[in-house]
Amino acid sequence: MDSLLIDMSCNGAIKLGSNVTCDGFVDGYKYRVQSHIHDDHMSGFDCSKGFQTIFMSEATKSFLELRHWDLRARANVISLSPYQVYRDNGMTIQLIPSGHMLGAVQVAVTTPTGDTLGYSGDFSWPLETVVRVDRLVLDATYGDPSSVRHFSQEDADDCFREIILQQTKRGPVIIKAHRGTLFRAYELLNGLVPYPIIANKRKIEEARVCQEYGYFICQMYDLDLPEVKKLRKEGPYVGLFYIGEQIPYDHDDTTIINLTAQCVHGQEPFLQFSESSFQIGMSDHADFNETLEYVQATGAKIVLTDSLRSNHATELAAALRKSLGIKATSAKLVYSLAWGV
């Protein structure tokens, strides 16, 4: 709906004005912004390649070129430097780092009539710069008021190191995480243990991209090479896997460590389920209180919370209305509410 200025389609595409989508394809919209590479933000990307001009950060483009070989040759896929402004007939698009993972951005759009519209994407807190907009589409990952961290991410990093050092004395350690969270492990493992760190070719390629953009990453060995398979049989190692991947269990004394982007409730950054099973909260998301702080910093007076990537968009919208006194609703209610625009 053009009259709403900010909206969301049923496939998860964020609409900013009548000509810009974020993280999804909508027929007839000229531009798409790709906020980052996580799968839940990649809806309709192949369609967008054929019909839209796509903007993204330089790092995001480097990651996507690993799987979308045609991006290097496509004139309609454009990388923007942080804070660079793209202009077209009175409209502007600007990408601002969101701190979520390498390459992730917030999006600011100014329409030809001067309306300022934004999309938070997934974001951490605090941030050096936030979008300053009147209307905002907001990530609601930590929209539950109980999603409050009682520890710092430095605490979680220290906990990760301690558990790795402790458990590799017992045997192999398997680390499971989603992509952005696993990138943090690449750095934390650098120089930490004297044992091989193994991963598949895809992760090794992505780690090289991280290194190109200033990450100090651990050395990794391709788990499918014959000599690495032999190492796996002989002693401790650290294996890196995405959530949902098939994992080789080479020893009975293998430790599993899940790195979760969700809050670990309590005062400690980890949960121990057994002597060989751990969960560590290593999120690059702002928690509930930090999300409220973020919205306040944007200056937005109208907020649409993303209910398609979170189950807590309704609670977050209610909290924004109560705590900040702004007009807020979740995306699933947008068609039944009058926004007064």
Image (spheres, helix red, strand yellow):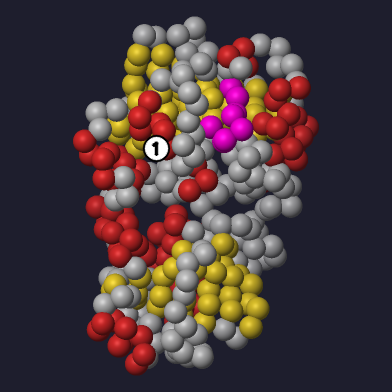
Residue where numbered disc 1 is placed: 46
> Tag 1: residue type?
Asp
Left or right for 79, reference 271: left
- Name which residue lies at 51% across and 91% down: 252
Q: Can residue 191 be seen in this view?
A: no
Residue 156, percent across and down?
Answer: 53, 65
The single residue placed furthest to the top in the displayed view is 113
Give the magenta part as a residue range.
Answer: 6-13
Vertical placement of 123 versus 130: above or below? below
* Residue 337 occupies quadrant: top right
SS at circle 1: helix
Quarter that holds the N terminus: top right
- Name which residue lies at 38% across and 48% down: 102
Residue 257, percent across and down?
Answer: 53, 74
Please state which of residues 135 and 176 is positioned toward the viewer in this rendering.
176
Please state which of residues 218 and 70 is positioned toward the viewer in this rendering.
70
- Name which residue lies at 52% across and 64% down: 244
* Residue 71 occupies quadrant: top left
Please state which of residues 331 and 283 is positioned toward the viewer in this rendering.
331
Left or right for 106, reference 79: right
Residue 239, percent across and down?
Answer: 41, 75
* Residue 152 occupies quadrant: bottom right
